[in-house]
Amino acid sequence: EESEDGEAPAAAAPSPKKAKPAAPGAEFAAEVRTDVTQPMLRDIADELSERLRAAGYNVPEAAAARQQLGPICIQSLSGTDLDVAAVLKAGAEQWKKKAEVECENEGNAALAGAFLELSSFEFKKGNSMKGVAYKKVSKALSEHATAITSGKEATKLANIGKSSGEKIDQFLETGTIAKLEEYKNEV
């Protein structure tokens, strides 16, 4: 087709494709530790779970992390050589990155992310009502213009009830929500 001036219409610019997210653990370079013995694996599992936590993965508390990462360490041990990268990648695949939520106020991002994670666990457990409720809490927190400083303040927002307000207080005091930690620690 030609336009009135006899020129072919300009082709529409292709829509930019979203970059595929990197595979869990892709940030960990090849690494092999030599002269590793079975008794050393407990401390190594603790160290590697901390590296995963520092990289933003949903690592459970220390004992549960060790219990889950220990067998992966044993599997990745060849003689006395431990494939550290394989352990880190397996742990990353198992625990996934913490939920990141874009927020009007960045001060609410970790809190909104915690409720989004809690929502995901509830859906996986078949508790769709709780899953939907926690997803709404996350959305309300992410859309709030100022940083939330208390559960009482948060309960004034739509879709945030007393129970969620208590969880918000808990998160603000401890940096986590007990129910979320309970789910993460399930083996």
Image: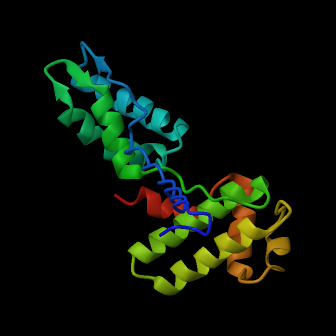
Is 176 on the left or on the right of 169, as rendered? left
Q: Quadrant of residue 73?
A: top left
Front residue (pair 65, 134): 134
Extreme-left residue of the structure = 79
Q: Position of residue 32 (x, y in %)?
A: 28, 19
Residue at horizontal 56 percent and vertical 63 percent from the top: 6
Residue at horizontal 39 percent and vertical 39 percent from the top: 25
Front residue (pair 19, 157): 19
Is 102 on the left or on the right of 46, as rendered? right
Q: Quadrant of residue 84?
A: top left
Is 118 on the left or on the right of 91, as rendered? right
Extreme-bottom residue of the structure = 129
Residue at horizontal 66 percent and vertical 63 percent from the top: 112
Front residue (pair 76, 55): 55
Q: Is residue 179 visible?
A: no
Q: Is residue 112 above or below residue 37?
A: below
Q: Position of residue 30 (x, y in %)?
A: 32, 23
Residue at horizontal 69 percent and vertical 56 percent from the top: 109
Is 27 on the left or on the right of 175, as rendered? left
Q: Position of residue 156 (x, y in %)?
A: 84, 80
Q: Is residue 174 visible?
A: yes
Work out which quarter of the rendered image holds the C terminus and state it. bottom left
Q: Position of residue 107 (x, y in %)?
A: 78, 54
